[in-house]
Image (spheres, rainbow, N blue to C red):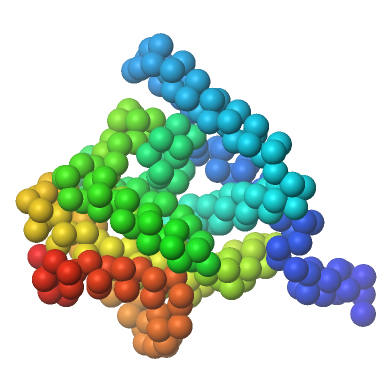
């Protein structure tokens, strides 16, 4: 066995959640995310001194979190830091892939500014060009979370209904910059939940730089279903509350995601049990199904 083969074998077998791998992948993810993350300073022509206020908001929160971390034990602090690394790496992979094959190159995914992440709970925005009107966009805000915390996923979903769906209020993204838009946009919001086993698998592939396998990974089928499920339920709940603008926005994204899923129908047929055993998807389905049943809504999109 050559030294190269031996090195590849070690890389193949190493723990994707080890400190060595996480540090390597986080540095890679941060570099990628920061290229596309909107910088508040670039919006002074629009917001003037309000930029300073928003920067102070971000700095204040980060200072508060740092002070709270000092009160924790070394074990608790290390756990938080590890989870933060995992979150950053996951976001980097997801943002990259949602701008590519996972959405059949029909969407553009960008990270939000720290202000919009902290203030509005949106990690990233996916834009979908409207067919026939290339300069008009529809988008959706996404919050990435880990399904090991089932109660946390349910709390995020409930918060979206309370803050956005029922009152007919979109999530605001203040610092947004794309080819067509610079400034404030408003988007409907959903949650993406991912199981630890898939996170580890993606990290292992990223560690070995196996881009094609990540682009073809079956997690995309789960993500698409989760988006479709939430858009369907939130569309109906919003409509029942008379929140027609929000209902229409979710309906538009539902149609676009459903069309993408149809293009991947063979992949779904090859993985018939992919959803039934997925804890994250089951959490979302049960939550949505329970809300619809309590409101007397059917399972069809309004």
Residue 115 appearing in the image:
yes
Residue at x 74% of width, y 58% of height: 21
Q: Where residue 158 sits: x, y (%)?
A: 31, 56
Image vertical order of residue 65 relative to residue 209, above or below = above
Image vertical order of residue 176 relative to residue 78, above or below = above
Residue at x 30% of width, y 36% of height: 172
| Quarter-of-image position of residue 48 | top left
Residue at x 30% of width, y 51% of height: 160
Residue 129 appearing in the image:
no
Quarter of the rendering occupied by the N terminus: bottom right
Is 16 in front, or is 139? 16
Is 139 in front, or is 166? 166
Is 284 in front, or is 176? 284
| Quarter-of-image position of residue 137 | top left
Q: Where residue 154 sits: x, y (%)?
A: 38, 61
Q: Is residue 265 left or right of residue 251?
A: right
Q: Where residue 273 sits: x, y (%)?
A: 42, 87
Q: Is residue 177 left or right of residue 211?
A: left
Q: Where residue 195 sits: x, y (%)?
A: 52, 69
Q: Is residue 46 left or right of residue 255?
A: right
Residue at x 71% of width, y 65% of height: 16
């Amino acid at each position: 066995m050559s030294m190269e083969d031996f090195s590849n074998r070690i890389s193949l077998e190493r723990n994707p959640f080890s400190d060595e791998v996480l540090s390597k992948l986080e540095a890679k993810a941060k570099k990628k995310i920061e290229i596309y993350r909107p910088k508040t300073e670039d919006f002074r022509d629009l917001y003037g001194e309000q930029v300073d206020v928003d920067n102070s908001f971000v700095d204040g929160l980060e200072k508060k979190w740092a002070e709270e971390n000092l009160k924790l034990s070394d074990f608790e602090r290390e756990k938080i830091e590890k989870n933060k690394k995992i979150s950053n790496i996951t976001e980097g992979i997801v943002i990259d892939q949602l701008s590519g094959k996972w959405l059949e190159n029909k969407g553009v995914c960008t990270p939000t500014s720290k202000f919009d992440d902290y203030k509005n709970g949106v990690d990233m925005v996916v834009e979908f060009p409207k067919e026939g009107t290339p300069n008009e966009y529809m988008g959706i805000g996404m919050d990435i979370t880990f399904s090991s915390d089932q109660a946390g996923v349910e709390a995020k979903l409930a918060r979206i209904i309370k803050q956005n769906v029922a009152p007919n209020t979109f999530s605001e993204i203040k610092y947004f910059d794309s080819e067509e838009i610079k400034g404030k946009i408003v988007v409907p919001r959903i949650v993406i939940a991912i199981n630890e086993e898939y996170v580890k698998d993606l990290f292992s592939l990223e560690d070995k730089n196996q881009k094609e396998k990540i682009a073809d990974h079956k997690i995309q089928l789960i993500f698409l279903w989760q988006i479709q499920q939430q858009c369907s339920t939130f569309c109906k709940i919003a409509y029942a509350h008379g929140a027609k603008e929000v209902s229409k926005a979710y309906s538009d994204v539902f149609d676009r995601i459903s069309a993408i899923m149809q293009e991947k129908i063979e992949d779904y047929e090859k993985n018939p049990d992919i959803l039934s055993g997925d804890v994250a998807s089951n959490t979302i389905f049960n939550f949505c199904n329970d809300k619809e049943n309590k409101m007397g809504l059917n399972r069809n999109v309004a």
